[in-house]
Image (tube, helix red, strand yellow):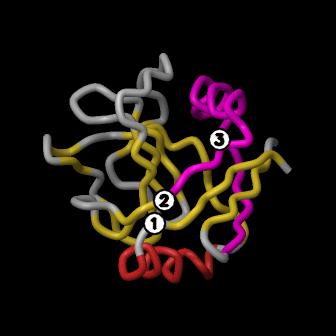
Amino acid sequence: MTMLRITAGPYQFEARMEEELAPKTCAKFLSLLPWKSQIIHVRWSGEGCWIPLGDLDLGLGYENHTSHPAPGHIILYPGGISETEILLAYGGVDFSSKMGQLAGNHYLTITKGNENLAALGNMTLWKGAQAILFEKM
């Protein structure tokens, strides 16, 4: 079982890669580590934060995809009708864009630090973009 450390704003989380359910997405993401970016609050999806990736083509299709990730689930939308993106759910999410409902690959599940998810979400909503770092433990 591969575990990642995620540092977002002032918070640290540990996450399990869903390698059995999303093997291609996990392998691709692992090849990009360490991944440093910024996380912002979603526009249409509800209680979530996202990392917009524009027209980045990761060569992925759908696997273990969902439109309703649970709090602590991280999904990757591989692109198509909307831009490529990573979304971290901290509450109720109906994954959407200006094009309508989307589905993303659930490839990471936060296992430690869940008590800080809502605080991170509120921070990105009211204070703006926060630094985020994904690294293998």
Q: Quadrant of the N terminus?
A: top right
Q: Which residues are magenta?
A: 11-38
Decide if residue 48 is on the left or right side of residue 25: left
On the image, the x and y values in percent for residue 38 come to: 52, 56
Q: CA distance from mark 2 to mark 3?
A: 21 Å
Mark 2 and mark 3 residues within 8 Å of each other at the beta carbon:
no
Mark 2 and mark 1 residues within 8 Å of each other at the beta carbon:
yes
Decide if residue 126 is on the left or right side of residue 98: right
In this picture, is 93 found above or below 77? below
Indicate which label's residue lies in the foreground, 1 or 3. 1
Q: CA distance from mark 2 to mark 1?
A: 5 Å
Query: For mark 1, what is the residue?
Result: 129
Query: For mark 3, what is the residue?
Result: 18
Residue 19: quarter of image: top right
First in sequence: mark 2 vs mark 1 = 2
CA neighbours of label 1 inside 10 A, class few (<14), some (14 to 19), many (20+): some
Element carrying mark 1:
loop
CA neighbours of label 3 inside 10 A, class few (<14), some (14 to 19), many (20+): some
Name the residue at 42% across, 55% down: 50
Query: For the residue marked with disc 3, what is the amino acid?
Result: Glu
Query: For the residue marked with disc 1, what is the amino acid?
Result: Ala
First in sequence: mark 2 vs mark 3 = 3
On the image, the x and y values in percent for residue 47 come to: 35, 70
Element carrying mark 2:
strand
Query: For mark 2, what is the residue?
Result: 39
Name the residue at 23% across, 50% down: 96
